[in-house]
Amino acid sequence: MSYLWNEFNIKTFPAETIVYRDGVFCPDLSTLPDTTIDHHTVLPVHVIYVGEISGENKLNLDIKFPHERVFLTAKIKNKKPAFLNIFIKNAGENSQCRGGIIIQNNDQFHLNISAQHDAPDTEILVHTKLIAHAKTRSILSGVAQINENAPRSISDISFSAMADKTAHIEFRPTQRIGAAPISADHNASIYRATPPQIQFLRTAGLSTAEINDTLREAFENSNPLF
């Protein structure tokens, strides 16, 4: 899967894989036969969602088995209006789902994440980074639901954005807690470089375009989940 590194700068690791490109499941690039995790896997499952999308798209992660480890890496962009709905259900006791999402919005983008804890000791952590270009509109929604039969859960859906001054961004986080978790967090933030940071890069001889590329790369690679 070297193309993932060459084209999308995504590192892979020993895992069963489910690969989507441009919103379409690619069986020839995946080690699992379809998008369903229908048995317990010895290796973790790595769901990889890359490319350019438009219109309505959905991604379901249904974790049914105890001690399952599922990782999501998404690197996507759009040139037309796009909607992505990600539904995560963790019903596997002591199972975890960790996701890192990077979005480059060039038009209108709506991301909706629904995370449901449905067994004890479950973990769902999803961190989304948005790069919002000029005159774009972005809505990032996240609902984490810890059901009454899911005590000791760990839940975190977070959003951060690096945005042009003309971009419009809405964050819509929600928590619904029916059992005592270990932790249940939501956060949203806007990143902008400080004048000293920009001045330092200028004194290093970087052009404006190179400074923007450097700051974007630093933003994308900060605080990795895995």
Image: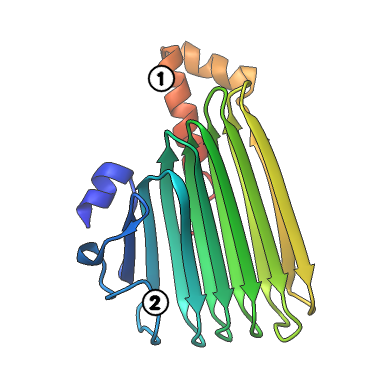
- Rate crowding at label 1 as few (under 14), some (14 to 19) or many (20 or more) other CA atoms within 10 Å: few
**Residue 55: percent from the left, percent from the top?**
46, 46
**Residue 138: percent from the left, percent from the top?**
60, 38
On the question of residue 112 being in view, the answer is: yes
| Mark 1 element type | helix
Q: What residue appears at the point 72 percent right and 56 percent down from the top-left corner?
A: 186
Which residue in the structure is indicated by mark 1? 210
Q: What residue appears at the point 79 percent right and 77 percent down from the top-left corner?
A: 178
Q: Quadrant of the N terminus?
A: bottom left
Q: Using residue 222 as the reference point, say whether residue 145 is left or right of it.
A: right
Q: Using residue 50 as the reference point, say whether residue 57 is left or right of it.
A: right
On residue 36, which mark appears?
A: 2
Q: Quadrant of residue 6?
A: top left
**Residue 66: percent from the left, percent from the top?**
51, 88
Q: Nearer the viewer, residue 145 or 66?
A: 145
Q: Is residue 50 above or below residue 163?
A: below
Q: Marks 2/1: CA distance?
A: 42 Å
- Rate crowding at label 2 as few (under 14), some (14 to 19) or many (20 or more) other CA atoms within 10 Å: few
Q: Using residue 21 as the reference point, say whether residue 113 is left or right of it.
A: right
Q: Quadrant of residue 124?
A: bottom right
The amino acid on which the numbered mark 1 sits, given as a three-letter code, is Glu
Q: Using residue 133 as the reference point, say whether residue 32 is left or right of it.
A: left
Q: Nearer the viewer, residue 205 or 32?
A: 32
Count how many numbered circles sit on residues in the image. 2
Q: What residue appears at the point 72 percent right and 49 percent down from the top-left corner?
A: 172
**Residue 195: percent from the left, percent from the top?**
63, 17
Q: Nearer the viewer, residue 102 or 84?
A: 84
Q: What residue appears at the point 34 percent right and 49 percent down from the top-left corner?
A: 22
Tell which circle, 2 or 1, labels the residue nearer the N-terminal end: 2
